[in-house]
Amino acid sequence: MEKVKIIIANENHFRHAKEICEVISDSAKVRGTGIAKRTPEYIQTKMQNRNAVIAISGNQFAGFCYIEIWGHEKYVAHSGLIVHPNFRNQGLAKKIKEFTFNYSLKKYPMAKVFGITTGLAVMKINSDLGYKPVTFSELTDDPKFWAGCKTCTNYDILTSKEHKMCLCTGMLYNPLKEVKKKEKWYDKKVLKRLKNIKQTMLASNKQLLLWKK
């Protein structure tokens, strides 16, 4: 088996779209969870727009994930994360998710990254990347996003709760907050360093005065 490569998907990967949809659907059935249905045409559009990531081993698709944009690029979401059965239990899902996450931060640097999922494995990966659990009210209010849930088996629950909650857990990564945290950490580090330098200088001056006496 050839080494798995994770790359940005393009038109050359259109041939994998149908199989990707089938694996996503089969995986949802095995887990017994609800999932929004995808079509090969929709997956191909994501590939064409360079909003999809694919893992390839030779000519075989090994894994996949794509980016959705909402609210005029105020929000982005990663959807359709899947690993082919032949490549599971190798940590590939986490690698694909990390690649997609870093890619979306570069492509949409001002967007909040969010997701809704029932999968514990995905929640763990999201948490490791810095996502925080949030209420649905903190996610995009774009009606097109929520319309995508109509094909999910849990849609009745979502509508009965007025789109405020469902079996999925909402998770959010806010890059602007992370930048502020880094700036705050950096400021503290600089202040501490300046304080140490000042204390060293004061100690040196004190020693110099004592020596002169």
Image (cartoon, rainbow, N blue to C red):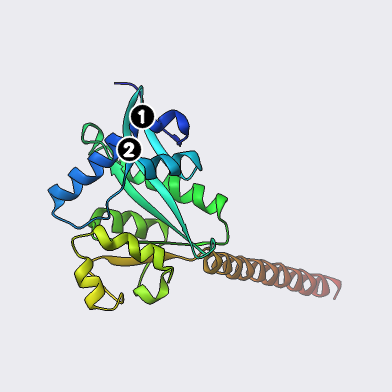
Tag 2 near tag 1, CB within 8 Å? no
> Taking 113 as reference, is 17 above or below it?
above
Would residue 54 be seen by someone viewing this image from the given angle? yes
Q: Identity of the amino acid at label 2?
A: Gly
Nearer the observer: mark 2 or 1; the answer is: 1
Compared across the picture, whether 73 is left or right of 14 comes to right
Q: Is residue 152 above or below residue 55?
A: below
Q: Mark 1 points at which residue?
A: 15
Would you place residue 191 above or below residue 128 in this image?
Answer: below
Disc 1 residue type?
A: Arg
**Residue 188, image x, y percentages:** 61, 71
Pick whichever, 141 or 174, lies toward us: 141
- For marks 2 and 1, give the CA distance: 14 Å
Q: In which quarter of the image is residue 92?
A: top left
Locate residue 190 relative to residue 164 in the image: left or right: right
- Specify the quadrant that holds the N terminus: top left
Q: Give x and y (percent) for residue 73.
A: 54, 60
- Residue drawn 70% across the image and 72% down it: 199
Which element carries disc 2, helix, strand or loop? strand
**What residue is pinned by disc 2?**
63
